[in-house]
Each structure stands twice: as structure tokens, then as C-alpha cells.
Image: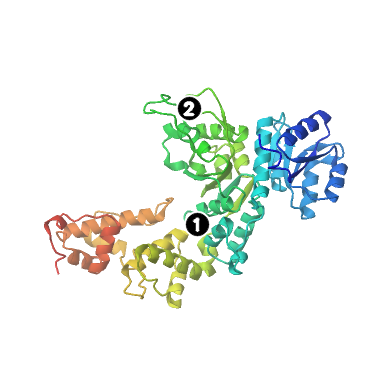
């Protein structure tokens, strides 16, 4: 138990009309070292609030003279800084969601487990104790203030368009809450960057951020990966191991591509989120976990629910607060800043000077569809840096410009048919890379791996084909024999 001096400056207001419960909450908090005041209805709660500031307000949802939700809404209208925890009847998911949307930090369901009660209160108080209640903004950075993790995370979300400003403002607004966040956006828009910003702007910034790609885990290993496993619980389990929930304890668990999670696992995930506890594979005991859930998807989960491919109850649990990331085509004005930031990073990783970005080049990039969003732009600039001479930037708009796939295939591989429309793939760039690799391999085979001749046959120069062979991992059988490029 913490010493009374550790939390003696933290003031908590408890609002509940049941005297016994109010006393239990008060005694529990006093033992933790907090200063506690109590109220039995909304009128008394406002009387306390009007006489001073609190760090935390804990309120029951149903009170004799109104709803706890009204208290939250009134606090928000008055721009009060107290964090709030709402206590709701078991199964009142709608009330819980409404309270989170109204600004509550978290909620508890009756009957309240005191161990969970203490953990949620400690989590809410943590930001007050560490002084991270309000995250810094990009303006702080511009005005020379020392940036914290939140400011740095927001700074990495490059772009000052109206759409991106709205995203950053929403991140700062929701960071104080424990409410689950669903990040939606097309492939390549930077969903993980947004999730990290939510984490870094919150009071959990110093705690673990665990990112999980739900589509990359074999279905047979999902339960062990998420919840942990005891030694001997399955073949190959030679020792106890923690799962993602345990690893993210007191921090944030980011579930990327949540729409790809199998239905059976969705049910187990829902239970873990609701109960705030997990049971490792092979164990009979449950372990309490304190994590904030941020999930992401490029799919329309509402449509997936209608198609019975995603559980409706899990969708409502995850989609309490939504952040929609705009595609690059809707924020073209951010292209110059994005290019500058990407070029600095790419050049730095390559140990090269940062090439100059001309207005003509930005305008040319602006004419592209960039359906792969920032990821596609980054790939283009990677190629540009690889092909640059000194500080002069040469953007290779392949495969659509430097190599015409239809013509190249007609020359070197007549038997291969290119679809009239690209497949509806999650990753267009992967499809293009596979097609380009096939074209180059066939061209190289046609010319006995003479790179100069193969390059000329598909409209490339020697340097370009060398770069592509390295990028696409194409090995020449002549390389081991010291063969030349045929020059």
C-alpha cells in the first residue's frame, strides 16, 4: 500500500447515493493516501466543485436528481480539468460508451471489484502525479519549448492541412481518456503513427506501447500470443511466456488490422477487454491487465458486421472513439512537407546528402494517383535517392513511366497476361513489385543475364536495372563467376 504522503495532495470527489457503497469507496481511497470528499447527488457534487478543484471525480451513473453523465457534460462545458470515472450497472454498455464520449477517463461496472477500482483510480491519477495531464502541442515546439513525447509524436504526423490539423486536435482531445480508439484509413496512411501519438500524448507515454499485426499471426497461435501460455500448455511451450496483454500492462495495446481477426478469437478478445483480465493458455488463474486498446483497420467494419464477418458487440466496444485518417489525395497540400521529411529520413539512413526538392518535381508527384498513400510516396522517393547524382534528385516513376508493363511483357513474355485492371489487393505496391520482378527475370533470361542488353530491351539503363535487381532480390547466376554487365 502506498504511503499516505505519496498521494496526500490528490483530491478525489466520490458521488454515489448509496451510503454503504460511498463509504466503501471512501475508505478504499483513504487507505491509498488520497484526500476524499463525498456527495450523494448532483447538487452536492456541484457544491463541492464550486468550492475548489479536484484531481478526480468518481460518480455513479444513476443519481436521485439526474445522471452522472450530466455531471460530466457540465464539467466539460465549464472547461474543468478533473478526470472522471463513471460507475454503471452491469451490462449497460450504452451508458458506458456515452460516458466515454462525454469525456470520462474510464468506467467501472457494478458490482465493483475493489482491486480493479484501485487500479483504474491509480491509472487516472498517474497523469496528475507525473504532470502529463495536458500534452504539449506542435505550437510548443515551434515556440522553443522543450518537447515531450506527445509533442514529438504529433510532430511526426507531417502535414498542416485542415484534415491533418483535425486529426491532431482529435488525438490531443482523446488522449486523456481510457476510451478504446479505432483508427480507420486506407493502406499506407500512417495508422500506427496515429496510434503511437494517442499513446504518447496520454499519461501512459512512459509505459509500453505494444503493436500487434492481427493478420500476421497463425490462427492456432492467437490465444497464446495474446494471453500468454504456461510451460507445457502446447507442443513447444518449454517455459512460461507472457502474451501481448501482459506485455502492454499499464500501457497501450495497438491491434493493427483488427478486421482480419478470426471470429473465434474476436469473442475471446471481447471478454479480455470487458473483464480487464486474461487467462494464459494452460492456466486456471486469471491475471488482471490494465491496457488501453487502440485498434486499426482499412476495412469498413460496419459492413463486416452486416456480413457477419465481425462481431457486433466487439465492434461497438472498439469503436467508442474513431479517428479517420484522410488519404493523401485529399491533402495534396501536405506533399511538399511530406517529401521533405521523407527525404531527410531516407538520406540520413543512406548516409547521403539530402537532395533538393524542386517545385516541378512536387507538381509532378501531385499528378500521380498515389493510391498507396504515404507508403507509395516513400517508395518513389527511395528510388529517387538511389538514382540521384549528388544533390540532384531524379525521380523514377516506374513502373508506369520508366517501364511500360504491357509493352515489356509483349516483348519478353508474350505468354504472360496483364489484367486490364489491377486486382483489388490490400497492397498495390506488392502486386506491382511482383509483376516488375517477373518482367525483369524474363528479360534477363532472354539475354543470358546480360544486364545491359536486358535493361535496353525494357527501356531501362544499366544503373536502373542494377537498382531494381537489388531491390527485388534478383540474383544473377553469372555474378558468382565474376561476369560483367556486358559493357
- Which quadrant would the N terminus be assigned to in this image? top right
The residue where tag 2 is placed is 281
Q: Is residue 413 visible?
A: no
- Outermost residue, top side: 284
Q: Residues within 10 Å of mark 1 (few under 14, many from 20)?
A: many
Measured from the top left, where is residue 170 in percent x and y?
63, 56
In the image, 311 versus 167, the foreground residue is 167
Give whichever of 450, 483 is nearer the camera: 483
Task: Residue 264 in the image: state x and y as whole percent.
Answer: 51, 31
| Of the two numbered discs 2 and 1 in the rendering, the one whose residue sits closer to the viewer | 2
Q: Residue at x 23, y 62 (%)?
A: 411
Q: In what element is the residue under mark 1?
A: loop
SS under mark 2: loop
Instruction: From the viewer's perspective, tell me whether residue 477 is left or right of residue 461.
Output: left
Q: Is residue 251 left or right of residue 32?
A: left
Q: Is residue 434 visible?
A: yes
Report x, y in % for residue 5: 70, 42
Q: Quadrant of residue 22?
A: top right
Quadrant in the picture for residue 369? bottom left
- Please say if 85 is above or below 148: above
Instruction: Residue at 12% x, 61% y: name it.
Output: 483
In this rendering, the answer to whether 487 lies above or below 61 is below
Q: Is residue 128 above or below residue 386?
A: above
Local crowd size for mark 2, using a 10 Å CA cut-off: few (<14), some (14–19), many (≥20): many
Q: In the rendered image, which quarter contains the C terminus?
A: bottom left
Q: Where does the image place residue 125, in percent across and percent down from the top left?
A: 68, 44
Above or below: residue 333 compared with residue 194: below
The quadrant holding residue 276 is: top right
Mark 1 — residue?
A: 189
As drawn, the label of residue 246 is none
Amino acid at each position: 500500500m502506498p504511503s499516505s504522503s505519496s498521494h496526500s495532495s490528490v483530491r478525489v470527489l466520490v458521488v454515489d447515493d448509496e451510503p454503504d457503497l460511498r463509504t466503501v469507496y471512501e475508505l478504499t481511497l483513504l487507505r491509498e493516501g488520497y484526500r476524499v470528499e463525498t456527495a450523494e447527488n448532483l447538487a452536492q457534487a456541484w457544491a463541492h466543485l464550486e468550492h475548489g478543484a479536484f484531481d478526480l471525480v468518481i460518480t455513479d451513473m444513476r443519481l436521485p436528481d439526474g445522471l452522472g453523465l450530466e455531471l460530466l457534460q457540465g464539467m466539460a462545458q465549464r472547461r474543468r480539468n478533473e478526470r472522471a470515472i463513471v460507475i454503471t450497472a452491469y451490462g449497460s454498455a450504452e451508458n458506458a460508451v456515452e460516458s466515454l464520449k462525454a469525456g470520462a477517463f474510464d468506467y467501472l461496472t457494478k458490482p465493483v471489484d475493489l482491486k480493479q477500482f484501485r487500479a483504474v483510480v491509480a491509472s487516472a491519477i498517474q497523469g496528475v502525479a507525473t504532470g502529463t495531464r495536458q500534452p504539449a502541442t506542435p505550437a510548443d515546439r515551434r515556440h522553443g519549448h522543450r518537447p515531450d513525447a506527445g509533442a514529438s509524436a504529433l510532430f511526426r504526423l507531417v502535414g498542416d492541412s485542415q484534415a491533418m490539423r483535425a486529426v491532431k486536435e482529435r488525438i490531443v482531445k482523446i488522449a486523456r481518456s481510457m476510451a478504446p480508439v479505432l483508427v480507420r484509413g486506407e493502406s499506407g496512411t500512417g495508422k500506427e503513427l496515429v496510434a503511437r501519438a494517442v499513446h504518447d500524448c496520454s499519461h501512459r507515454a512512459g509505459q509500453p506501447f505494444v503493436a500487434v499485426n492481427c493478420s500476421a499471426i497463425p490462427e492456432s497461435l492467437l490465444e497464446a500470443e495474446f494471453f500468454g501460455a504456461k510451460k507445457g500448455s502446447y507442443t513447444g511451450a518449454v517455459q512460461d511466456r507472457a502474451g501481448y496483454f501482459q506485455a502492454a500492462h499499464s500501457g497501450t495495446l495497438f491491434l493493427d488490422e483488427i478486421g482480419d481477426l478470426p471470429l473465434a478469437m474476436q469473442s475471446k478478445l471481447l471478454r479480455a477487454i470487458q473483464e480487464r483480465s486474461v487467462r494464459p493458455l494452460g492456466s486456471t488463474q486469471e491475471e488482471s491487465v490494465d491496457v488501453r486498446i487502440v485498434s486499426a483497420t482499412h476495412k469498413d467494419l460496419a459492413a463486416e458486421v452486416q456480413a457477419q464477418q465481425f462481431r457486433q458487440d466487439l465492434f461497438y466496444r472498439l469503436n467508442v472513439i474513431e479517428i479517420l485518417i484522410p488519404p493523401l489525395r485529399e491533402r495534396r497540400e501536405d506533399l511538399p512537407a511530406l517529401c521533405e521529411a521523407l527525404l531527410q529520413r531516407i538520406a540520413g539512413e543512406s548516409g547521403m546528402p539530402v537532395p533538393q526538392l524542386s517545385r516541378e518535381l512536387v507538381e509532378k508527384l501531385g499528378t500521380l494517383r498515389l493510391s498507396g498513400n504515404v507508403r507509395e510516396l516513400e517508395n518513389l522517393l527511395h528510388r529517387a535517392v538511389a538514382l540521384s547524382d549528388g544533390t540532384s534528385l531524379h525521380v523514377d516513376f516506374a513502373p508506369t513511366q520508366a517501364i511500360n508493363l504491357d509493352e515489356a511483357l509483349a516483348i519478353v513474355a508474350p505468354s504472360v497476361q496483364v489484367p486490364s485492371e489491377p486486382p483489388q489487393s490490400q497492397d498495390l505496391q506488392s502486386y506491382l513489385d511482383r509483376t516488375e520482378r517477373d518482367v525483369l527475370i524474363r528479360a534477363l533470361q532472354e539475354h543470358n543475364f546480360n544486364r545491359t542488353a536486358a535493361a535496353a530491351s525494357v527501356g531501362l539503363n544499366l544503373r536502373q536495372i542494377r537498382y531494381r535487381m537489388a531491390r527485388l532480390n534478383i540474383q544473377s547466376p553469372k555474378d558468382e563467376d565474376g561476369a560483367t554487365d556486358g559493357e
